[in-house]
Amino acid sequence: MKREVSKLNIDGKILEYSMCGKGIPILMFHGGHSNCYEELGYSDLLRQGFSLITPSRPGYGVTSKEISESLLTASKFYAKLLDCLNIKKVHLLAVSAGGPSGISFAAHFPERTLSLTLQSAVTKEWLTKKDKEYKAAQILFNPSVEKVTWKFISYMNNCFPIFTFKRFIPSFSKLSPHDVMTKINKEDIEELCRMNNRYRSGCGFLIDILQATELSSNTLNSITCPTLIMHSKNDGAVSLEHAYFAKNEIEQSELCLLDSWGHLIWIGDISTETTEKVASFLLKNNPTLSLDKLD
């Protein structure tokens, strides 16, 4: 995948971002442990004629962690990125732990938002101190340790791909390993390996956990753009409660429940169908067939 990676210096803080494709612009908010080099679901959207703008969110890649002072602060930086690119309005696509970023931008910058798509997204308080996942994250993805964590995952991933994937299934899916494997093929396992090999947490994942607590009904109530909420019925990482919460709180929203194997809806037997639904929604809510640029 051909992409251009750049850094924007705003008031002494760095915002790293990538751009790929030519066409209708989508501002992409990647999920946890990722950055502007994300690839999941990108190829299909590029083939559909979209351009993808992906900032590394605060604490990921080389983006300054100070941008995470609040979701609103980060949203202002994303708006300045669009100013720099001379783009007036975009579609938003927010994934998993990137959900709060997309929700915040749509709520605070309605004049710059054509639509919002939430995929497997966090939409309210997520991991709390009482959750074992929270406690594990504080250890495994602490900035001083996460590099070692991901090196170990990559080693296991490359040497024993199927074995490693099966060990991670409970983190992603409510289905049994046997049922998941009926929805996954060899190419999907290879895609998962590439995903794990490029992932790093930096300071970003612990920031994600904190920022999810900033979301409220008032924030979601403020969203006025058409919103598509996509969530797997079998998601084991972000519960369906998040999808239902968003549907109840966002007035112009539609809920699309998927019969995919789990959290990573861009991989597996219905991944193409998922992208087609997104493309149809975006085109339906796009006022032009070209970039909507600043006057």
Image: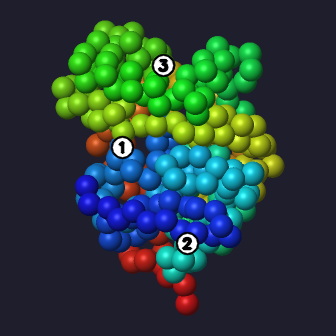
Q: Secondary structure at mark 2?
A: helix
Neighbour tally class for label 3: few under 14, some 14-19, many 20 plus, Cα within 10 Å: some
CA distance for labels 1 and 2: 23 Å
Q: Is residue 161 above or below residue 108?
A: above
Please tell me which of labels 1 and 2 falls first in the chain.
1
CA distance for labels 2 and 3: 35 Å
Q: Position of residue 42 (x, y in %)?
A: 34, 51
Picture residue at 66% right of the left edge, 60% below the top: 75
Q: Secondary structure at mark 1?
A: loop
**Which residue matches tag 2?**
82
Q: Position of residue 87 (x, y in %)?
A: 51, 77
Q: Nearer the viewer, residue 199 or 43?
A: 199
Cβ–Cβ below 8 Å for labels 2 and 3? no
Q: What amino acid is found at the position of numbered circle 1 in the picture?
A: Leu
The tag on residue 171 is: 3
Q: Position of residue 233 (x, y in %)?
A: 48, 26
Q: What amino acid is found at the position of numbered circle 3 in the picture?
A: Ser
**Which residue matches tag 1?**
40
